[in-house]
Image (cartoon, rainbow, N blue to C red):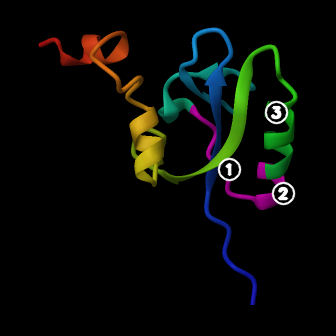
Amino acid sequence: MSRQFTPKVVTANALLEGDAVWLTEDDRWTRDIAEAELIEDEAHAQIRLIDAQSRKAEVVGAYLADAKAGTAGPEPVHFREAFRTRGPSNYAHGKQEHASRP
């Protein structure tokens, strides 16, 4: 019996800034997972991953991450991916610094 495919998003790190990025349906890289393309077909996911991995001038480390449909767009399923949406973890700077301000 074959296993059911879990929806995915294509994610990577921006080559110059190092930020976590997600691939959108219109082939842009976004820093907001809610804008990512939620892929529900395994063959389509593999094609999108191959395309992302070929974009070496833009990103590094592209891979498929489990995701689920949320009210505002795709949401992470696993802790690692949820953690990546919040930016660097070594100390408050960049995205974390701005998010902590009232």
| Quarter occupied by residue 17 | top right
Residue 43: image tag? 2
Read off the residue under disc 1.
39
Tag 2: Cα neighbours inside 10 Å, few (<14), some, or many (≥20)? few
Residue 50 percent coordinates (x, y)? 86, 40
Residue 96 percent coordinates (x, y)? 30, 18
User: Tag 2 or tag 3, which sits nearer the N-term?
Assistant: 2
Residue 4 percent coordinates (x, y)? 66, 75
Read off the residue under disc 3.
53
Residue 8 percent coordinates (x, y)? 63, 51
Distance between mark 3 and mark 1 Cα atoms: 16 Å
Distance between mark 3 and mark 2 Cα atoms: 16 Å
Of the residues shown, which amino acid type is indicated by label 3?
Gln
Is residue 79 or residue 7 the one in the foreground? 79
Dot 2 lies on which element? helix
Tag 3: Cα neighbours inside 10 Å, few (<14), some, or many (≥20)? some
